[in-house]
Image (tube, rainbow, N blue to C red):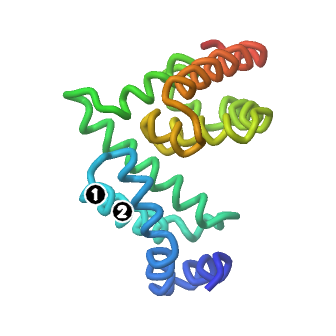
Amino acid sequence: MTDHQIIDSFWARSETAIAQVQERYGTAGEAIANNLLQSSADAEECVNDALLRLWNSIPPERPVSLWAYFVKVIRNLALDRLRKRSAAKRSGLTLVLEELEEVIGTDDSWQEGQVLAIIEDFLRNEDAENRALFLRRYWRGESIADAADAVGLSTHAAKMRLSRMRARLREKLKEEGINV
């Protein structure tokens, strides 16, 4: 079944849509949630919650990319769960988010609108290796060592690149009139 057909199944309110998403994207979605939460039980629960969210949001939504929509839902659920969990203690992802908050601020509205468009433009202008490193670290929540290994860099080189990328992003945001 194609993504388009699965979305049509959601619109027809057919429960096979949920099974198809689970079969097609469940394992990858669970891996993303597990990277963020560091708990396979919580990751599995996030995937189940994401499937319910998809059921409740399609319709009226008709996503262009089912995969991107599913991952966004999983990521947001995992981050919400992490924020609740880390209210009392700091986790690895809390530190990841703090690195990025230095640049984009703490306002949750950065995920919407202008700032997100600036970040996307910034990443388009980075080379593929830097873009992959940035996304693995700040979107998927991977450790610097894992992200560095995935793109073929040493941990030290990855730390330096990420630091320089955050500085360039901060400058780009300032150029665009975003106060950080």
Q: CA distance from mark 1 to mark 2?
A: 14 Å
Nearer the observer, 114 or 123:
123
The quadrant holding residue 51 is: bottom left
- Type of amino acid under label 2: Asp
Q: Is residue 81 left or right of residue 12?
A: left
Image position, residue 108 (x, y; %): 50, 31
Q: Residue at x 66, y 64 (%)?
A: 65
Q: Residue at x 55, y 69 (%)?
A: 58
Image position, residue 164 (x, y; %): 64, 18
Q: Which residue is mark 1?
A: 40
Image position, residue 169 (x, y; %): 68, 21
Q: Residue at x 49, y 29 (%)?
A: 155
- Type of amino acid under label 1: Ser
Specify the quadrant that holds the C terminus: top right
- Of helix, strand and loop, which one carries label 1? helix
Image position, residue 167 (x, y; %): 64, 15
The answer to which of marks 1 and 2 sits earlier in the sequence is 1
The quadrant holding residue 110 is: top right
Q: Which residue is mark 2?
A: 49
Q: Which mark is residue 79?
A: none
